[in-house]
Amino acid sequence: MTDPTTTVASSGAATSAPLLRVTGLHKSFNGVPALRGVDLDVRPGEVHGLLGANGSGKSTLIKVLAGFHDADSGTVSIHGRDLSSPFGPRGLREEGMGFVHQDLGLAPAGTVLEHMALDNVGHASGFRRVDWTAERTRVRELLDRFEVEVDVDATIDMLTPVQRAMVAVVRAVGGQERIAGGERRGQILVLDEPTVFLPRHEVGMLFALLDRLRAAGDAVLLVSHDLDEILQVTDRITVFRNGETAGTRHTQGSTRDDLVQLILGARDEHVAKGAAVVHDDRPPLLSARGLTGNRIVDLDLDLHAGEVVGITGLAGSGFEELPELLYGVRAPRAGTVVQEGQPVTDLRPAASMARGVILIPADRKGQGGVLGLTVMENMSLPFLTRRARGFRVDWKAIEAQAQEACDRLNVVPPRPEAQFGHLSGGNQQKALLGKWLDTAPRVMLLSEPTQGVDIGARREIFKLIRAAVAEGMSVLCATSDYEQLVEMADRVIVLDEGRIRTEIHGDDITKDALASAVYAEEAS
Ligand SMILES: Nc1ncnc2c1ncn2[C@@H]1O[C@H](COP(=O)(O)OP(=O)(O)OP(=O)(O)O)[C@@H](O)[C@H]1O
């Protein structure tokens, strides 16, 4: 089923000898294979995309390279030198690899200088005096070289999101430069979904930094689920499918459909949104009047049965805040909320849940699920009391329900007893969504619901949500993912500085229309 790696003649980076070559790498967890002989090569001066459905093995490969897991077999060669796992706790860092994970690994109170110096200080053997003057010069030079304009004495919490991401990138590259010493070798930087937490308008700044790494002869392995982003920024793309390499393509000449086909092993199946049957003859399921929060100012909103309402805007425009205000995670400064004609007096999460209003937060690891519990335990949390008879909990019924939900949602692995924290990110999100849909909510408040979710699973999630909406649920979806809004929303509200700038309906919701509404000049 594996399609041999395509080698297309091209100029420059794509034809030089690889900086990193992975051959036949295997890794199983408790006898279940996660990597089944993957191959990958990354060349100097290229940004190489790594794509694959949730659970296809991308993170497992990165964790092997980073020394977090040992591979069962296979080789990795860097700069032409063959190495075999285990690579030790520092992984291949000493060999010139740097890793930037989604959370960036930066402490809010630490300064840029402290973070960048940490690698040198931390790995010196025994006690060593830190020559702060020399470190300051080195760090400034490094930041200047990559044109990252930040004050080395600024603490991380003073930086913008993209500045933080750029510091993490330069830190990863700089750390290896120092370790390698002497003549500068090409570095290999692994970036795991770096744009997920970035405001849309800042993504370009990070990509410009990747261009500078490319020009310096470094290589970047970029993991992402965003096909447009991958097509925009990479030179070549490797796709994993079920722990195998499904193929490698040159980006130039590849289309979205080609990639979807490689990822899913099937053609893209667009889910038609269908005409919404909005019940605006009845009282809205949820209304807000004069709602004011930290960013949102005096907002009026009605959510009717049978509709998906999108809300978007620039980062900081307030759209991110709305689900939390309506759910009661944070108290509004002013305004009223009415549910089906009844004023809401207790606007707190537990009371919202009891009224059938649920929130699925963006940060699923931090807020949505309990990593140490099983899938079944996570899925059953919302209705444990309903499944209890006296002091006894009907675990058989819970297990049957969890199994049914895993099958329906295509959760991999489809085992309710699997530990939730061992599921890939997208599968965690599907499991969480499944549990909430099973509570038959009246109103679902979503915040970036398919972040880190692969294209196949996204479609499944959209289908489930549309089905629940057709039954009379109402959805508010706060996201900066325009594609998601095009696919899902019946109308989209665009916020600007906390106020409604415009509203786009039905077929007028296109990526272009959303982008121009979001970025429109103040004059509008
Ligand atoms: N520590 C672990 N224990 C057991 N199984 C694991 C562990 N880590 C990963 N797996 C399994 O290995 C497979 C590959 O997961 P991996 O996280 O590498 O996928 P991924 O491609 O990174 O997915 P995503 O895009 O969702 O992040 C999955 O089936 C996952 O459940």
Image: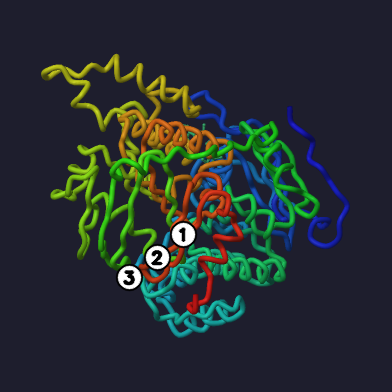
> Going 50% across and 57% down the picture, which residue do you hit?
504
Please provide percent x and percent y for residue 87. 56, 46
CB within 8 Å, label 1 to label 2: yes
Mark 2 residue's CB less than 8 Å from ligand 1: no
Check the image and name the residue furthest to the top. Answer: 396
Residues under labels 1 and 2: Cα distance? 8 Å
- Whether 102 is drawn above or below 62: the answer is below
User: Which dot, 3 or 1, sits closer to the camera?
Assistant: 1
Q: Crowding at label 2, few (<14), some or many (≥20) Cα neighbours within 10 Å? A: many
Q: Crowding at label 3, few (<14), some or many (≥20) Cα neighbours within 10 Å? A: few
Q: Is residue 102 visible?
A: yes
First in sequence: mark 3 vs mark 1: 3
Please provide percent x and percent y for residue 290. 25, 63
> Going 22% across and 53% down the picture, which residue do you hit?
337
CB within 8 Å, label 3 to label 1: no
Residue 301 lies left or right of residue 56; in this view the side is: left
- Whether 225 is drawn above or below 374: the answer is below
Residues under labels 2 and 3: Cα distance? 35 Å
Q: Is residue 104 visible?
A: no
Q: Amino acid at mark 1?
A: Glu
Q: How many marks?
A: 3
Please provide percent x and percent y for residue 511. 59, 56
Residue 401 lies left or right of residue 99; in this view the side is: left
Nearer the observer, 288 or 56: 288
Q: Amino acid at mark 3?
A: Ala
Residue position for label 1: 503
Residue position for label 2: 500
The numbered disc on residue 108 is: none
Residue position for label 3: 109
> Going 35% across and 20% down the picture, which residue do you hit?
401
User: Which dot, 2 or 3, sits closer to the camera?
Assistant: 2
Q: Amino acid at mark 2?
A: Ile
